[in-house]
Structure formats: C-alpha cells, structure tokens
Image (cartoon, rainbow, N blue to C red):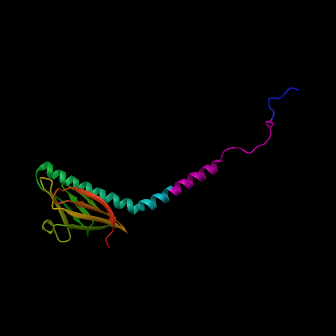
Amino acid sequence: MHASPRRGRPPRNARHGVAGVSLLEMLLVIALIGATSVLAAAAFGGGFAGMQLRSNAREIAAQLRYTRTRALATGQPQRFTIDPAAHTWAAPNDHAGEIPAALGVTFTGARQVQPARGEGAIVFFADGASTGGRIQLSAKRAAWNVDVAWLTGQVTLRRVEASR
C-alpha cells in the first residue's frame, strides 16, 4: 500500500480549538498590567503628594544653586528668600515661585539676614560661601531637606522623615 502524506494529521475540515487569545482577553491583560503599574508607582513613590514634594524640593535646590552662581558671576552678594507662612520663595533676577499649600515648609537659618519676621534668607557671597541654612518641605511622614553649607555654599538635597 501506498502511504498517504497526511498520515497522523487530522482532516482539514475538522474543528479544533483556536490557538491564541481573543481581543477581549488581550485588553483585560493590558488593563491589569496598567492598574498594577499605577498602584506600584503610588506605593513606591508616595503617589502624587510624593512627586509634588520631590519636585518642589528640587526646584528650590536649583534656585539656591542659581543664586550661588549669580553671586560668583557678578562678584556681588545675592539673596534667596523664603516665606514659610506664605509658601513663597524669591531668587535674584525676578525668579520667584510658590510652594503648594499641601506641603509643610520650615526654614532654619541666620537671623542676621532675616528680611522680615517669619521670613528667612540665605545670602551667597562672591567667593561662593553663604550664610547657610536649611529649608524642609514635608508631606505626611516624608520630607526633603535642602541644606546650604555656610562655608562652601554647597546645596544638597536629602530625603528624610518629617519632623513632628
């Protein structure tokens, strides 16, 4: 007998389960991955409040560095001011900003350069040194310290637990 080349194979017209996934199953898996990603980002990053806190701390650190650079470039003292009660800050050349009301703001620095009661200032000198200080932004239990070294004027940013 002559062997058929189709031996062991099912006939072409036989119904079999379709290999693969349906569009609905694919969309469900994508939705689950998306939801898991959002929850993981919120858990690890502190959610929107955590992003807002980190973003504002970085902005203040950048403006402090800008103020120091202006002092070095111009050879003249430059002042960065912050008003914790009003949630505002100001740097040279009309650089100014607001800190969201949801964030706590504290300032520790030299009283001699304090522009007004309740406000704080950090002065940078022509050689890069400063009066030093710390600005702390906080939300819930998290906080970021923006520290300015008095001797070098170096600005550092560090995540800490909020002081109570």
Which image quadrant for residue 2? top right
Location of the C terminus (image quadrant): bottom left
Location of residue 37 in the rendering, given as x and y in whole percent from the top left corner: 50, 55
Residue 93 appears in view: no
Location of residue 49 in the rendering, given as x and y in whole percent from the top left corner: 39, 63
Relative to 73, is 40 on the left or the right?
right
> In the image as oriented, which residue stretches furthest toward the top?
2
Which image quadrant for residue 123? bottom left
Residue at 80% from the left image edge and 29% from the top image edge: 5
Relative to 108, is 52 on the left or the right?
right
- Depth order, front residue of 95/28: 28
> In the image as oriented, which residue stretches furthest toward the bottom?
164
- Depth order, front residue of 74/86: 74
How many discs appear? 0
First to last magenta residue range: 8-36
Residue at 61% from the left image edge and 49% from the top image edge: 26
Note whether 149 is above or below 9 in the view shown. Answer: below
- Depth order, front residue of 86/162: 162
* Residue 23 belongs to magenta span: yes
Location of the N terminus (image quadrant): top right
* Residue 89 belongs to magenta span: no
Location of residue 9 in the rendering, given as x and y in whole percent from the top left corner: 79, 36
Residue 82 appears in view: yes
Which image quadrant for residue 153? bottom left
